[in-house]
């Protein structure tokens, strides 16, 4: 793209994921971040809503910060399928020319985002943890100061297995695209009674051999609490020792009114299901209190829980990196400490 064509691209756009005509929480989180990014650019925020009979969801998006809502409403978009959704979003991008396009790193977004970025011939940074507007390169190269570009989307994500943090820009093509995992960005307090400025758009859909047919949708029934919603998490790592030993953590969680979560090592060992995993390849959580029990604190795990209000670490290794992020640390044998802690809290509550 030449400079002139780059300047045609304006506005911060968010893919407003909906499933079964219910907007996913990630859409509201992305709108919160989009409002932040739009301010220094002096531009507005647009939500892109794809689906069938979804127009009545647009006001919710306005309440969470969308200045405009582009609605593509078509029977072909009733259930998520890669081809019609990619066609719809790529068509919106080509028609309205957003400067920035944010997509949630959900199962849907991880499929849709890269497909669309390839179609519109731009880059995509996946699994971003920080997004901000700034200069690129971050520091001007001596003698090439005039080549430094301003008002770029700086996309930060863990790289090389989480051992370093990379800041990535997309200076020469538009839109600048990023996927962001749920739980990382913060939604705004809703603007009650906000009404959406709706733009209806339909590029036309012609089913081709890439349109799959959905034979059946099987919904898994889960009675577990979503760890992303929990206020208190009691999280166990490899140091817990066995699936049976998690009973101690369950007891502690029960007296606190909390939920049990775990590290990747626990899932890999088959002790707990993946939907309880915290970390870079699991979920990002922000509870009021996070107990890290027998968790060494690898950077991949810390990326998923460092925003917790209070972090309490229990580990027998005093040099474990988890103590670097913990507000409170106990060095010792978790098999003795956890039952004692549970008993003490129980006793304290009984004396209330």
Image: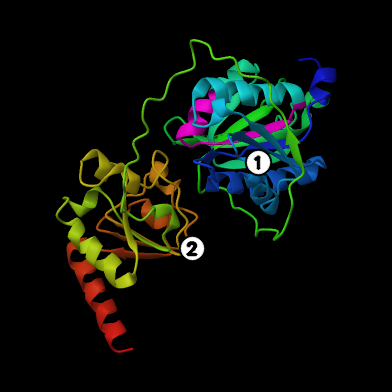
On whether residue 201 falls in the magenta region, the answer is no
**In terms of depth relative to the viewer, which is nearer, 148 or 214?**
214
The C terminus lies in quadrant: bottom left
Q: What count of labels does the image hold?
A: 2
Point out residue 196 in the picture as x, y percentages from the top left corner.
73, 47
| Mark 1 nearby-residue class (10 Å; few <14, some 14–19, many ≥20) | some
Q: Quadrant of residue 283?
A: top left
Point out residue 158 in the picture as x, y percentages from the top left corner.
49, 36
Point out residue 106 in the picture as x, y percentages from the top left corner.
48, 37
Say left or right for 283 vs 100.
left
Q: Residue at horizontal 76%, vertical 15%?
A: 1
Q: Residue at horizontal 61%, vertical 16%?
A: 119
Q: Quadrant of residue 346?
A: bottom left
Say left or right for 224 vs 74.
left
Say left or right for 263 vs 54.
left
Q: Residue at horizontal 37%, vertical 25%?
A: 215
What stretch of residues is rendered in magenta? 96-114
| Circle 2/circle 1 CB separation < 8 Å | no
Q: Is residue 163 above or below residue 30?
A: above
Q: Residue at horizontal 56%, vertical 28%?
A: 75
**In terms of depth relative to the viewer, which is nearer, 33 or 3?**
33
Q: Which residue is mark 2?
A: 309
Secondary structure of the residue carrying numbered label 2: loop
| Mark 2 nearby-residue class (10 Å; few <14, some 14–19, many ≥20) | few
Is residue 171 visible to the viewer in this orientation of the structure?
A: no
**In terms of depth relative to the viewer, which is nearer, 220 or 182?**
220
Q: Is residue 333 above or below residue 216?
A: below
Secondary structure of the residue carrying numbered label 1: helix
Q: Residue furthest bottom?
A: 351
**In terms of depth relative to the viewer, which is nearer, 69 or 143?**
69
Q: Which residue is mark 1?
A: 55
């Amino acid at each position: 793209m030449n400079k002139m064509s780059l300047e045609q691209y304006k506005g911060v756009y968010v893919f407003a994921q909906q499933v079964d005509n219910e907007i996913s929480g990630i859409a509201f989180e992305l709108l919160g971040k989009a409002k932040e990014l739009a301010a220094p650019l002096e531009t507005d925020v647009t939500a892109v809503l794809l689906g069938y009979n979804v127009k009545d969801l647009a006001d919710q998006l306005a309440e969470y910060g969308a200045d405009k809502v582009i609605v593509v409403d078509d029977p072909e978009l009733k259930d998520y399928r890669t081809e019609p959704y990619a066609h719809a979003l790529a068509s919106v991008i080509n028609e309205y020319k957003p400067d920035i396009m944010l997509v949630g790193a959900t199962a849907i977004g991880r499929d849709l985002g890269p497909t669309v970025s390839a179609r519109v011939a731009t880059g995509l940074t996946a699994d971003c943890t920080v997004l901000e507007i700034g200069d690129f390169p971050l520091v001007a190269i001596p003698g090439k100061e005039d080549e430094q570009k301003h008002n770029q989307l700086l996309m930060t994500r863990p790289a090389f297995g989480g051992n370093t943090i990379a800041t990535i820009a997309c200076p020469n093509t538009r839109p600048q695209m990023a996927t962001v995992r749920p739980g990382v960005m913060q939604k705004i307090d809703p603007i009650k009674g906000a009404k959406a400025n709706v733009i209806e758009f339909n590029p036309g859909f012609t089913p081709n051999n890439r349109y799959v047919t959905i034979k059946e949708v099987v919904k898994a029934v889960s009675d577990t609490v979503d760890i992303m919603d929990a206020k208190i998490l009691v999280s166990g790592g490899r140091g817990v020792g066995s699936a049976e030993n998690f009973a101690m953590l369950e007891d502690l969680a029960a007296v606190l009114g909390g939920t049990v979560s775990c590290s990747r090592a626990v899932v890999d060992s088959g002790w707990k299901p993946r939907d309880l995993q915290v970390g870079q390849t699991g979920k990002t959580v922000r509870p009021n209190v996070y107990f890290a029990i027998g968790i060494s604190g690898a950077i991949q795990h810390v990326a998923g829980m460092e925003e917790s209000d209070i972090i309490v670490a229990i580990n027998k290794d005093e040099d474990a990196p988890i103590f670097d992020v913990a507000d409170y640390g106990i060095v010792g044998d978790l098999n003795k400490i956890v039952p004692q802690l549970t008993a003490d809290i129980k006793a304290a509550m009984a004396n209330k």
